[in-house]
Image (cartoon, grey):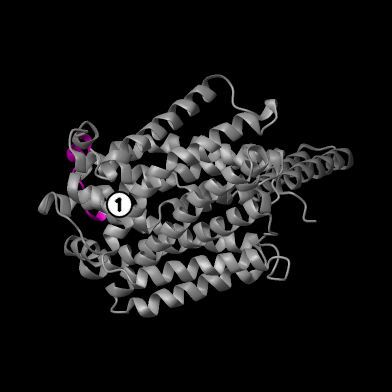
Amino acid sequence: MTEPAGDLADDLAGDLADQAAVALERDGGAVAVTAAVLRRRWLVRLGFLATWGTGLVVMLADTDAGSLITAAQSGARWGDRMVLPEIVLIPILYVAQEMTVRLGIVTGKGHGALISERFGRKWALLSASTLFLSAIGALLTEFAGIAGVGELFGISPFVTVPIATAFLLSLALTGSYARVERIGIAFGLAELAFVAAMFLSHPAPGAVLHGLGSLPLGHSSYVMLVAANVGAVVMPWMVFYQQGAVIDKQLSTGALRQARHDTAVGAVLTQVVMIAVVVAVAATIGVAHPGATLDTVGQIAGALTAYLGHATGTVLFGLGMLGAALVAAIVSSIAGAWGLAEVFGWAHSLNERPSRRTAKFYATYAAVHVVGAALVLASADLVSLSLDVEVMNALLLPIVLGFLLVLESKALPSEWRMRGPYKYLTWTLCLIVIAFGLYMVPATFGWA
């Protein structure tokens, strides 16, 4: 079996400490000691870097095509007034995903498997249903984003979506989780193009500061967009993915600290991208056409290119959207297949190529893509579809976070559970989000 990444870092530290001692004994000089110490620090840091990746890739996937479309709509309709909610969502995102990291590393079991073990098959099926809905919903938005980018360059969705589907199916067949993770991060980093777009849009600092102090919660359309943004931050497939990923990556408890750092950096990075989109659209479309409604991905890109230049705007928007859509498609589809496999007890690992043992897992992975691609090709209003998916995610949050909080307090040994101020902060943030999701149910279904 491959040596766990956390243990690898510890072994590197021990071996290099021995080398430093030998150098001291042999040479008796400060130069040898200094060289050994410097080498030790460098290699230990390299060992720590082996534990990074699960948090970064899941957070980059969090800023998916649907999230970016939601951010663009927020900036167009409400200007910089959506920046503060995006900032507030950073700690909420971190505490939720940090719990999944601890659950996965300490128990060695996936989210669906823990629910089945602790609460029984019926509750596990309920959890799996939320996962299925969110994973299919995520793929819809990712394929919608890919289709929209293709249309910017005159390529039909009937070409781009099947090509993307074939690529995603082949990626999972490589037999290496690490390879999938690296490719996902590479695609996700393309989202930084939106940060460049924000600076090129020349936002007025005064307008951004004014937006930070203005929260029009009395307007139902603003509250609905806040709900969509909440749904765009913590999604069921993120919980299933990161808990399964730390297991597939074989992280040990010694890697927990670095896994937390990985998650924290990713949480900040993903919200920086969201804020960049809100500010860029607010400084351009929001100023020239306040309250505008953008009905297609092409309209969002076209509106930005009017201010950033056709070539610059098209390239930046297309690059950022394509990267976001691909990394999120990878993560959400893997999460969906992992979660269902956990609930039904199927063998599942990206470190194993398809075989009779893993056939059900890979069949589920393929089916999710085919269904998602077919639904997108049959849909006309891709932006409305994306917003509906994000609101649906907000409505599913009470179930997702409820299970997560209970598992953290029941499934973990006492020494690995939250305690003190951090525990109360986490419960408070999660309960606020749960209450918000429940509050949105009547408005969403027209009952109020």
Query: Where is residue 214 shown, x and y percent of the image?
Result: 20, 33
Tell whether position 71 is magenta. no
The amino acid beneath tag 1 is: Thr
Tell whether position 201 is magenta. yes
Query: Would you say 384 lies left or right of 389 here?
Result: left
Query: Would you say 193 lies left or right of 30 here?
Result: left
Q: Quadrant of residue 292?
A: bottom left
Whether 162 is drawn above or below 253: the answer is: below
Please name the residue that numbered disc 1 is placed on.
70
Q: Residue furthest top?
A: 420
166 and 282: which one is in front? 166
Residue drawn at 53 percent across, 46 percent down: 127
Whether 377 is drawn above or below 107: the answer is: below
| Segment tinted magenta in the rendering | 200-209
Question: What secondary structure is the magenta-colored segment mainly?
Answer: helix
Residue drawn at 24 percent across, 64 percent down: 296
Query: Where is residue 243 shown, x and y percent of the image?
Result: 60, 46
Residue 87 appearing in the image: yes
Residue 273 appearing in the image: no
The secondary element bearing badge 1 is classed as helix
Mark 1 neighbour class, 10 Å CA radius: few under 14, some 14 to 19, many 20 or more: many
Q: Quadrant of the C terminus?
A: top left
Residue drawn at 11 percent across, 53 percent down: 289
Whether 442 is drawn above or below 164: the answer is: above
Query: Where is residue 196 shown, x and y percent of the image?
Result: 32, 55
Q: Quadrant of residue 23?
A: top right
